[in-house]
Amino acid sequence: MSEFWLISAPGDKENLQALERMNTVTSKSNLSYNTKFAIPDFKVGTLDSLVGLSDELGKLDTFAESLIKKMAQSVVEVMEDAKGKVQENLLANGADLTSFVTHFEWDMAKYPAKQPLVGVVDTLAKQLAQIETDLKSRTAAFNTLKTNLENLEKKSMGNLFTRTLSDIVSKEDFVLDSEYLITLLVIVPKPSYTEWQKTYESLSDMVVPRSTKLIAEDKEGGLFTVTLFRKVIDDFKTKAKENKFTVREFYYDETEIKREREEMTRLLSDKKQQYQTSCVALKKGSSTFPDHKVKVTPLGNPDRPAAGHTDRERESEGEGEGPLLRWLKVNFSEAFIAWIHIKALRVFVESVLRYGLPVNFQAVLLQPHKKSATKRLREVLNSVFRHLDEVAAASVLDASVEIPGLQLNNQDYFPYVYFHIDLSLLD
């Protein structure tokens, strides 16, 4: 299980023996794997200051956990095409999270134990606040890029009636720069191809003979060109509609088409180069974008790239690791390490407040073997350490017992110091 219980008990002979009994029972019953959790001796200060730190650390603990969840989710979003490898990128000091927790060592260089506790807490708080600020700005930029890209991709989805045609048509399909002639695009249902070929020249006067050409089709119909005189456009559209042929409003603008293609190329490149790893490779089988619901096949020039890039080029572009993913990996590690240090500080502060001065306690990390064993494990701990607080222990063992003046829910109060670390929230 990726769940840990961080507890402490006084370090006197009686309680060290209680810890040994706990280890014996939990080992024989296969309830948990237990290891000592080393916490340095800090400058305690006054008990009043510890009470204030206890409240501050509780809030910082919640903030840190929320932050690393957000960062883990950001990694999932960035690695959208490689989600199976997400856990490989959620590490702490290069180690998997479980190993880091079970082999935790206080970082004296980053958080010197010799300085006052309030200084250590302030360092952690500022570090996490800066990571959150950076995360917000970086993910905002990433989401803006994704939105712009998705908006362009939406234009390529759908059928010939609604999708963009800029990646289908070419300059050679149109009569351009003519004062009198114009080329229209007409969508013809597949069952009506023969009828179109027989009738399009007679739908109106002044239609250029043999000017039609099928340039693309989807599962419902085909996109045909037809050239006629500008003066009969309206009449041709009316007659075409009567025959269930649809004139698609489209006029070839080479500058606009080039701009749209360049914008798509730029966004795809930005998404790869600045943010992602292996996420911009587009799948073969669509004209421009991955996972089209409607396949549109350009005809007449099969070697022409759909939008400035070949599938092979797009696939090769997906290799590499972008700055956002690198930043997330580094700062997720920093935030996670800070979070476990906060847990250690909470154990220290609560142990001093609970067991008093001089500082003398032993912290232990328990990893329950399975979810079904947690209830039994809790019962063992409450039984072994009930002497630390007879009334509280009795209330936990017997939920019917009420403790006058105790504000905590009986099931949430223990005779020993206890904190929970749940790594499954990051899966």
Image: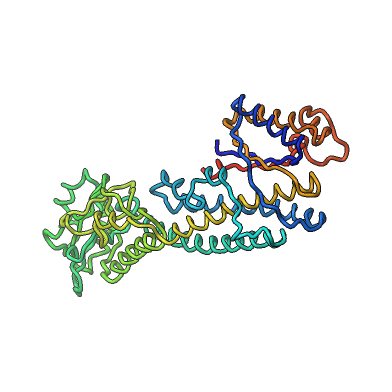
Location of residue 112 in the rendering, given as x and y in whole percent from the top left corner: 64, 60
Q: Residue at x 37, y 62 (%)?
A: 273
| Viewer-side residue, 302 vs 45 | 45
Residue 213 seen in render: no
Location of residue 312 in the rendering, given as x and y in whole percent from the top left corner: 24, 54
In this picture, is 102 found above or below 337? above
Position of 308 with respect to 195 (left or right) is: right
Location of residue 36 in the rendering, given as x and y in whole percent from the top left corner: 63, 41
Q: Residue furthest right?
A: 404
Q: Residue furthest top?
A: 29
| Viewer-side residue, 421 vs 206 | 421
Q: Residue at x 38, y 55 (%)?
A: 277
Colouring chosen for the image of the structure: rainbow
Position of 390 with respect to 288 (left or right) is: right
In the rendered picture of this protein, how many numbered marks are placed on residues?
0
In this picture, is 211 found above or below 399? below
Location of residue 257 in the rendering, given as x and y in whole percent from the top left corner: 29, 66
Q: Quadrant of the N terminus?
A: top right
Q: Quadrant for residue 6, please give it.
A: top right
Residue 91 seen in render: yes
Q: Residue furthest front?
A: 13
In this picture, is 390 found above or below 239? above
| Viewer-side residue, 399 vs 259 | 399
| Viewer-side residue, 173 vs 269 | 269
Q: Residue at x 35, y 57 (%)?
A: 320
